[in-house]
Amino acid sequence: MEENGRKQKWIMWTWVLAIAVTAIFFASYRDSQQVEQLSYSDFLQQLEAKNINEVFIQHDVIRGEFIKPGAEGRKRFIVTRVDGRIAELLAKHHVKFSGVAESSLLRDLLGWIIPVLLFGGFWVFFMRRMSEQGGGGGLGGGFMSFGKSNAKVYVE
């Protein structure tokens, strides 16, 4: 009965993980569909036409918002940064801009917390499995029971 409960918990957590991964995938897909990918020359044309409201500058990417939506009705855009003098151009055209630190909660979770949880989960899984199987070769008693002896002492 106890093994059946463990199996149900394992199946439940598998479903929770699958749903979370699916939700993250669809959220990132939806966001990517609402953003127009611009070439740098198109970005400069939009800047000259004074159609850029606000810009967020990362190390190699520029994200921003149009004043009037683009051809496909998208209000946000992304462009690969080419020119190092972008701040001068933006200030010249009176566009609000700011730098963005390249850190995100999702990347931190994927980089640190999830691997620790996976290692811990594998450790618990293998320890339970070894204790259920008798600790190697069917000797009985589990993984850490090598000091226990089944020998009987007969006193005369």
Image: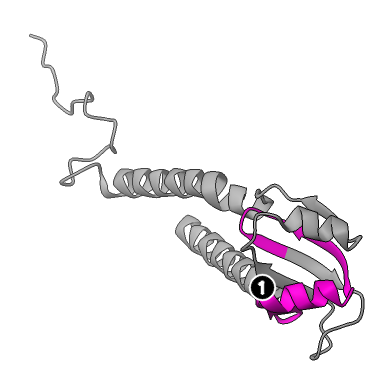
Q: Which residues are magenta?
A: 33-62
Q: SS class of the residue under badge 1?
A: helix
- What x and y, as percent, mark residue 90? 82, 59
- What x and y, as percent, mark residue 130? 30, 46
Say left or right for 1 vs 74: left
The quarter of the picture where residue 136 lies is top left
- What x and y, as percent, mark residue 60? 61, 58
Residue found at x 92% / y 60%: 94
Q: Indicate whether 149 appears above or below 12.
A: above
Q: Is residue 95 visible?
A: yes
Q: Which residue is mark 1?
A: 40
Q: Indicate whether 98 appears above or below 12.
A: above
Q: How many marks?
A: 1
- How crowded is the residue under tag 1: few (<14 C-alpha within 10 Å), some, or many (20+)? some
- Callout 1, which amino acid? Tyr
Say left or right for 46 vs 14: right
- What x and y, as percent, mark residue 4? 49, 63
Q: Nearer the viewer, residue 28 or 156?
A: 28
Q: Nearer the viewer, residue 84 or 103?
A: 84
Say left or right for 53 vs 40: right
Residue found at x 91% / y 81%: 68
The quarter of the picture where residue 35 lies is bottom right
